[in-house]
Amino acid sequence: MKYDELFALLRRRGVLWPSAEIYGGAQGLYDYGPLGAALKRRVEEAWAAWFLGLSPDYHRIEPAEILPEAVVRASGHLENFTDPEIVCEQCHAAFRADTILEKVRPEGVDGLTPTEIAEVVSTHQLRCPNCGSRALGVPRAFNMMFGVDFGVTGRERAYLQPETAQASYLSFARMWDVGRKALPLGIAVVGKAYRNEIAPRQVLFRMRAFTQAELQIFFDPAHFDLPFDRVRDESLPVLRVPRREAGEESPEWVRASELVAPGGLPEFYVYHLAHTYRFYRDVLKYPIDRIRLFEKSDAERAFYNRIQFDVEVQLDSLHGFKELGAVHYRGDYDLGRHSQGSGRDLSVTLTSGEKVLPHVLELTFGVDRNVWALADTHLSKDGERTVWRLPPYLAPVPVGVFPLMPKHHSEYALRLADDLERAGVAARFDDAGTIGKRYARMDEAGTPYCVTVDGQTLDGDARDTVTLRDRDSKAQERVRAADLAGRLGPTLRPPRPPRA
RNA sequence: GCGGGCAUAGUGUAGUCUGGUCAUCACAUAGGCUUGCCAAGCCUAUAACCCGGGUUCAAAUCCCGGUGCCCGCACCA
């Protein structure tokens, strides 16, 4: 589906809409309606079920979302999230300072003040890459973080977190104490991140407030035992740097065992990359031929990332592969910085007596982007029919309950819907319009099951049975009303990683 | 941020160039009729010119500013 058409449909059905619309809207902010909020919650639950299911040592916490200034100073966000920007006064094009200086100063501009950068520009008589003029202005610092006043004096500064990861690093010491005091230790957070994007675009893909689901795994690089056999034979659609440099866009299928061959990637990395891939393929059920694991080159990834593959899914509405998540091997950068910044030694002593500063493997997942991607890839028009083929456990409303004839069958249907709710199966009663319209409405909302109460339900041999209609096949089956919860319930729970 | 385009009911739209009827049509929504299992039909109702200023006897229409969206560029630690 095309972008405009898809967004119109999502607005019409109340999945999401621009924030503050009555005031003309606020760029980069969106609100989720009932269907969107429910879908998003289910995506988050599915994420947690899968990734926390990888190990009993992975735990979910819920930290504060405001970071004191000292934290972002230590993490590097205060300096590095500020990309000094240089504007050409001739053609008004804007560039990051390190782009303009890359020829004369390949090591980057970190640590330089705007004045110093301006001196480098004038000393080397650098020209605007766009129009070639020498009219480059003085660099101006632009920080992507939202700063807030903190405390009553207003003199203390704090920042809305630009990523959820920092909060996990801050919690590491406490988690070590309340936990088993053993590595690996995983800390999962689902939370909001805030970035003052220069150009928010494409609805859920570049927002100023968005939800991340991240798992930070702290481990001893010398010793990270995993059941690698569980992924050894898994084929992964990887697009590695050499292949990309050869101009290839499509991935090649490589076995996990080959990726870890001597000189290759570490086992702990491939193990988690494979499970990440499985999550997109088996849980969110993106079409296999649309997923690729895109390796970032030295130049592309952040300097602290030693290995980085992005999970990308091809989306028709956005014309190509889009990043929906990533697996980052960040080394000991984060705990190192926070040890330094806080003055507290974050290294730990293992039972062997050895002292190590844990390394971090970060599994990051953009919740909002995946909500959009699930609409793009699973929602389609078959002629007149619009169907959102979400897996049952992701459907905002898993069950619709209808009276065939509202006058005669509503009472039974209302009670049935209530029974299902009480049994833990979210069900929506609908008696509006004709039966065909109700099916169509639910198809569009992604509801996998519709139950209809008819004349046979009320009396006769088939008393207390209803028709159960499947969204994808449109097939109907007569089932005992009392059996519904037991039968549908299991399909509404998100999958967990398979055991060996 | 830069350049170009666009902005009319919940959604999609006609009308804007060439100012002047009660702002068009479809779908959706709500109510009613219909013994009806895949968007059936009929009746009724609700509902819009993005915001602010200007020109004019008169502005959805022309002009200025703002906001938002789309495309391209730039940006996306």
Image: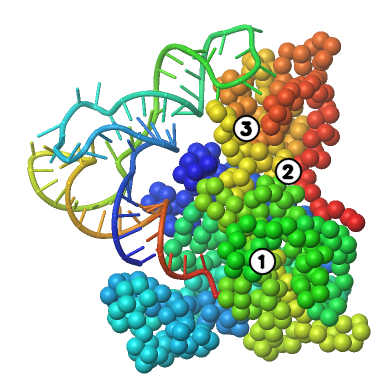
The residue that appears at 64% across and 50% down in the rendered structure is A290
**How many neighbours does mark 1 have within 10 angstroms: few (below 14), some (14-19), or many (20 or more)?**
some
SS at mark 3? helix
**How many neighbours does mark 3 have within 10 angstroms: few (below 14), some (14-19), or many (20 or more)?**
many
User: Residue A125 or B48: which is nearer the viewer?
Assistant: A125
Q: Which-is-in-front pick, marks 3 and 1? A: 1
Residue under numbered circle 1: A240
Residue B46, relative to residue A368: is it above or below? above
Residue under numbered circle 3: A443
**First in sequence: mark 3 or mark 2?**
2
Marks 3 and 2, how far apart in space? 15 Å
Could you tell me the amino acid type at mark 2? Tyr
In percent of width and height, residue B2 lies at 31, 65
Could you tell me the amino acid type at mark 1? Arg
Specify the quadrant of the image occupied by residue A484.
Answer: top right
Does residue A146 appear to the left or right of A463 in the view shown? left
Q: Which-is-in-front pick, marks 2 and 1? A: 1
Label 3 chain ID = A
Residue A371, relative to residue A338: is it above or below? above
Do the residues marked 3 and 2 share a common chain? Answer: yes
Could you tell me the amino acid type at mark 3? Asp
State which quarter of the image contains the C terminus of chain A: bottom right
Q: Is residue A100 visible?
A: yes
Specify the quadrant of the image occupied by residue A90.
Answer: bottom left
Does residue A221 appear to the left or right of A391 in the view shown? right
Determine contact: label 3, label 2, CB under 8 Å.
no
SS at mark 1? loop
Q: Which mark is residue A393?
A: 2
**First in sequence: mark 3 or mark 1?**
1
